[in-house]
Image: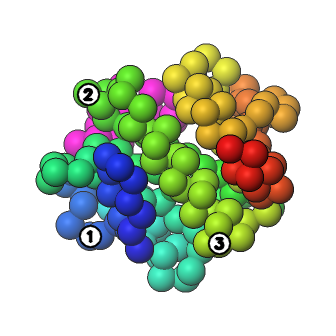
């Protein structure tokens, strides 16, 4: 599966992505607001195998983020489902710090949102964001999401940003 934006290619994960992703997962800035860096390659392999398994099962999943014209994975963006928030599908994303402040992850998140609503016909999507993660909050807001509530997620205060398919359709039709 592949999504294209003006500046990015979002494609399904492959086994050969392990080395590039292991470098990203070992980067403390990339893994900020997470449960910590992956110090073992095994964790990266487990992540990629899990995501590829979701793809094989037809479950909404994650995409690698590849800038057009570059042969580099600079992050990921796509769908997660968490046992802690049953029935919800999250748009989650991470981007290499060298690519921050260019609007790239917003571009990726919008493509994923549009794919979720237009192609997968999801009824709603959320983003789970630590209150202090201002850049991610801005991405969610630019993605048309509003704060719905605050919860505890994996031991941390977390804002739940949400948008429904109906809200997306109304905003799309209004523009």
The 10 Å Cα crowd at callout 2, few under 14, some 14 to 19, many 20 or more, is: few
Q: Is residue 18 above or below residue 121?
A: above
Residue 69 lies, in percent from the top left, at: 16, 51
Q: Is residue 24 above or below residue 59?
A: above
Q: Are marks 2 and 1 in contact (CB under 8 Å)?
A: no
User: Label 1, on which residue?
Assistant: 15
SS under mark 3: loop
Report the quarter where the C terminus lies: top right
Q: Nearer the viewer, mark 2 or mark 1?
A: 2
The 10 Å Cα crowd at callout 3, few under 14, some 14 to 19, many 20 or more, is: few
Residue 129 lies, in percent from the top left, at: 64, 32
Q: Is residue 131 above or below residue 119?
A: above
Point 47% across, 60% down: residue: 62
User: Label 2, on which residue?
Assistant: 98
Quadrant for residue 87, please give it: bottom right
Query: In the rendered structure, which segment of residues is drawn in magenta?
Result: 22-38
Point 52% across, 73% down: residue: 54
């Amino acid at each position: 599966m592949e999504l294209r934006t003006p500046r990015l290619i979002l494609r399904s994960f492959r086994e050969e992505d392990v080395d590039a992703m292991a470098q990203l997962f070992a980067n403390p800035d990339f893994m900020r607001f997470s449960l910590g860096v992956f110090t073992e390659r095994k964790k990266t392999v487990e992540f990629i195998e899990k995501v590829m398994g979701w793809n094989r099962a037809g479950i909404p999943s994650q995409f690698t983020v590849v800038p057009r014209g570059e042969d580099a994975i600079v992050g990921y963006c796509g769908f997660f489902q968490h046992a802690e928030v049953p029935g919800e599908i999250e748009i989650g994303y991470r981007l290499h710090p060298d690519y921050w402040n260019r609007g790239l992850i917003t571009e990726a998140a919008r493509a994923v949102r549009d794919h979720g609503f237009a192609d997968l016909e999801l009824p709603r999507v959320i983003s789970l964001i630590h209150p202090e993660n201002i850049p991610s909050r801005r991405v969610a807001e630019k993605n048309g999401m509003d704060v719905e509530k605050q919860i505890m997620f994996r031991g941390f205060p977390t804002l739940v940003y949400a948008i429904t398919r109906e809200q997306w359709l109304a905003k799309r039709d209004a523009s």
